[in-house]
Amino acid sequence: MPGPAPVSSAPVPPANVPPAHVLPVRVYYEDTDAGGIVYHANYLRFMERGRTEMLRGIGHDLAAQRQAQGVNWTVSRLAIRYLRPARLDEALEVVTQVAALRGASVDLVQQVRRADGGGTGALLSDATLTLACMGADGRPVRLPADVRAALAVAPAGGGA
């Protein structure tokens, strides 16, 4: 009689969630405090780079989009946790994943992990945030259709 089916230890994302974008980051001296540990605010900088590169990877350069469509992005909500320290010269990965698309905003989940080449290394910090799409006048505007379509599928460029 056959035994039980093997159980996978790797989490499987739901079918409707696109894979994550993974950005490699190196910790430089300027990122650390006097003890060689990454200063807490710099995790936000790493995550900003991850979001920017995810958007660039799906074909949406922020400066070009602002100039062509008058669209700006702003963080309207952010919750972050710091779990383990990152240290000088460590290789990290910023993992960015779309959690939900709304009319004028997108919810993201971001993680800073020790680099392992696949975005699954030790979790150092994680955040949930909402990016709001704003017009040139500073008022919310609907996500452009091409941006919405691109965010609804797997991020390109450095994705896991």
Image: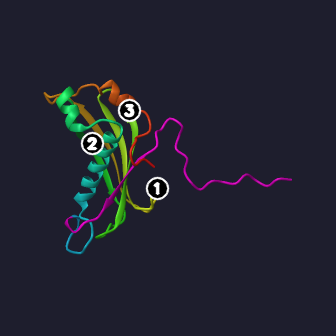
Q: Relative to residue 21, is residue 32 depicted above or below?
A: below
Q: Which mark is residue 118?
A: 1
Whole-percent x, y for residue 39 in the image: 23, 64
- Front-most of 67 and 135? 67
- Front-most of 62 and 130? 62
Badge 1 crowding class, 10 Å Cα cut-off, few under 14, some 14 to 19, many 20 or more, is: some
Residue at disc 3, secondary structure? helix
Q: Quadrant of residue 152?
A: top left
Q: Quadrant of residue 112?
A: bottom left
Sequence-first tag of 2 and 1: 2
Residue at disc 1, secondary structure? loop
So how many labels did they put on this image? Answer: 3
Mark 2 vs mark 1, CA separation in Å? 27 Å
Whole-percent x, y for residue 73 in the image: 23, 36
Whole-percent x, y for residue 19 in the image: 46, 43
Q: Amino acid at mark 3?
A: Ala
Residue marked by disc 3: 150
The residue at the far bottom in this view is 35
Sequence-first tag of 3 and 2: 2
Residue marked by disc 2: 77
Residue at disc 2, secondary structure? strand
Mark 3 vs mark 1, CA separation in Å? 22 Å
Sequence-first tag of 3 and 1: 1
Give the main secondary structure, helix, strand or loop, of the magenta stretch: loop
Q: Please state the extent of the stretch shown in magenta in the rendering.
A: 1-30
Q: Relative to residue 35, is residue 82 depicted above or below?
A: above
Q: Is residue 52 magenta?
A: no
